[in-house]
Amino acid sequence: MKVYKYGDNVDTDVIIPARYLNAPDEKSLASHCMEDIDAQFASTVEQGDIVVAGANFGCGSSREHAPLSLKACGVKCVIAASFARIFYRNAINIGFPIMECPEAAAAIQAGDTVEVDFGTGVIRDVTQDKTWQAAPFPAFVDGIIQAGGLLNSLKARGVAR
Amino acid sequence: MGMTMTQKILARHAGLDHVEAGQLVEGKLDLVLGNDITAPVAITEFRKAGLTQVFAKDKIALVMDHSTPCKDIKSAQLCAQAREFAKEFHITHFYDVGCMGVEHALLPEQGLVAPGEAMIGADSHTCTYGAVGMFSTGVGSTDMAAGMATGLAWFRVPAAIKVTLTGKLQPCVSGKDVILHLIGTIGVDGALYKSLEFAGEGVGELSMDDRFTIANMAIEAGAKNGIFPVDDKTRAYLAGRVNRPWEAVEADPDAVYDQEIVIDLSALQPTVALPHLPSNTRTIDQVEGTPIQQVVIGSCTNGRLDDLRQAAAVLKGRKVADGVRCIVIPATQQITLDAMAEGLIQTFIESGCAVSTPTCGPCLGGHMGVLSDNERAVSTTNRNFVGRMGPVSSEIILANPAVAAASAVAGCLADPRKL
């Protein structure tokens, strides 16, 4: 569960460059994930790894391909000081976990071993022996996550057919 | 407690008398938009979820504008997927090559957006339509799929920043300079999760095209949306385009704002954003002379008729400098026709510009003007992120159409007032 750490304003163009949007399948998206900010990321990331970043993570283009590519790489979650609002929506809607916690985002270092509990919102840095509490999701948003994404939640409510 | 323009529209669409910032609501949508990159992902999700109905075939707009005319086989396959969906569900507003334009210029032109309405679009610059006094915001493909199926979307009611405009713009200064100045002031997350509510006597001095440009880049400050009050210019623009009834909203006098910013339009100078953030702004006098290899004039930000007029006024009787490629992309077919009628296209071609059919192409490094290693472009587009228009070593400087045209002539960043 190693950590990849980036700064503020990581935009969706560097998460998945537009030149790869013509192939929106998981395998292709995963193979180019983070390519323009970290050329080594896609070849070294492993199932369960965590991305930690500063403020305004996922700003720019609305491309849902961005959280999809991180999810397809096996990234367990993104911990950031704050998220750009479209990325925030997209992550929730596709069931990709994100945690907003400025203190954890500042303290956690690249390479640290980090454990997260989505149920309680507790983030634990095993390497530094520190814990933090992420901002909780509103009940409505938590309902979408529990249902396994937006479309599942709408189908369960009977409003989408 | 009073409500902002945005809050009133969300309340109305959620069937509530009152909403407050932070409240989560589910709102009815007047329109759902997608393009040839985002719609296919939405369609795949729609089908994967086993959905079989759209909420209203005439309230969905699909615009094939990003990789079109198709740049490669994979892009063609994505367009084919959208085309098949549009046919199967009898989507009224499907815009293919030949009638399509850059979506955020096309929809207002076609009368698909009106004051007081609410919409989502699977494109971050969907916030453009706030220029006509409606709520519009960018979302992802799953929201689009849900919107197409149900006509509903969930929203966290945004807090607001009030931007009061005073005075009047000087020559060679336009809406682009207003929004770049604002982003430079508050930062790329200065309006995160919030609405930008424009107000003040200065609004009346702005053309509709300037307002579209300003609202378009609200997202570049992190905003959920940007919105303008409706006035005579709005009504004149909508006349003959929008035939259905609409109802404008006004902010309550006691609406609550997190922050208030005043911008004196008269004091603004041509403003550019240096690599690699739209907030990295300078006035033109600080950066004149920076060498460039390409100029792009177009996009959902600055591909409208007023923009082309401003660029042509600079280029008329002049030549694009050796070593510079200048690409002009009128944003819609109608804008191309209007520009032809005014002689603007002739001016561009005689000056040595390449003129293209409508496409988003170069703005996102897709096609029709991708940069090479270490090249630098002046562009009227909206983002100058790392790798946006080419390799990670390439650079983009954002500017208004007059500055872009002057830079094409000079071969370096240039002030159009000094040519």
Image (spheres, rainbow, N blue to C red):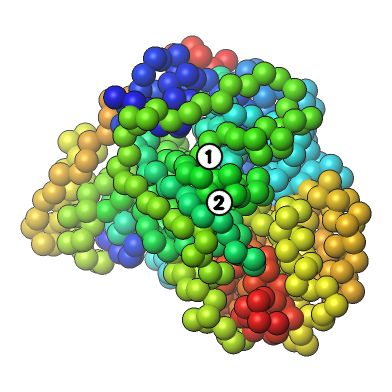
Residue A33: tell me if it is visible: no
Q: Which residue is more in the foreground, B369 or A119?
A: B369
Q: Residue at x 33, y 30 (%)?
A: B254
Kindly identify which residue carries mark 2: B214
Kind of residue indicated by mark 1: Phe
Kindly identify which residue carries mark 1: B228
- Distance from disc 1 to disc 2, alpha carbons, whole Å, reads 10 Å
* Label of residue A79 in the image: none
Mark 1 surroundings: few (<14), some (14-19) or many (≥20) residues within 10 A = many
Give the position of the C terminus of chain B as an image quadrant. bottom right
Task: Residue B181: give x, y in percent of width and height.
Answer: 47, 62
Mark 2 surroundings: few (<14), some (14-19) or many (≥20) residues within 10 A = many
Q: Which residue is more in the foreground, B197 or B65?
A: B197
Q: Residue at x 85, y 62 (%)?
A: B344
Look at the numbered disc 2 and give the secondary structure of its residue: helix
Q: Is residue A134 above or below residue A157?
A: below
Task: Residue B22: give x, y in percent of width and height.
Answer: 31, 31
Q: Which residue is more in the foreground, A79 or B310?
A: B310
Q: Residue at x 19, y 55 (%)?
A: A104
Q: Is residue A111 above or below residue B214?
A: below
In the rendered image, which quarter is residue B414 located in?
Answer: bottom right
Which chain is indicated by disc 1?
B
Q: Residue at x 37, y 44 (%)?
A: B161
Asked whether, in this view, residue B151 is left or right of residue B221, the answer is: right
Task: Residue B311: give x, y in percent of width and height.
Answer: 74, 66
Comes first in the chain, label 1 or label 2: 2
Are the residues flagged by discs 1 and 2 in contact, CB closer than 8 Å?
yes
Q: Is residue B393 above or below residue B106?
A: below
Kind of residue indicated by mark 2: Ile
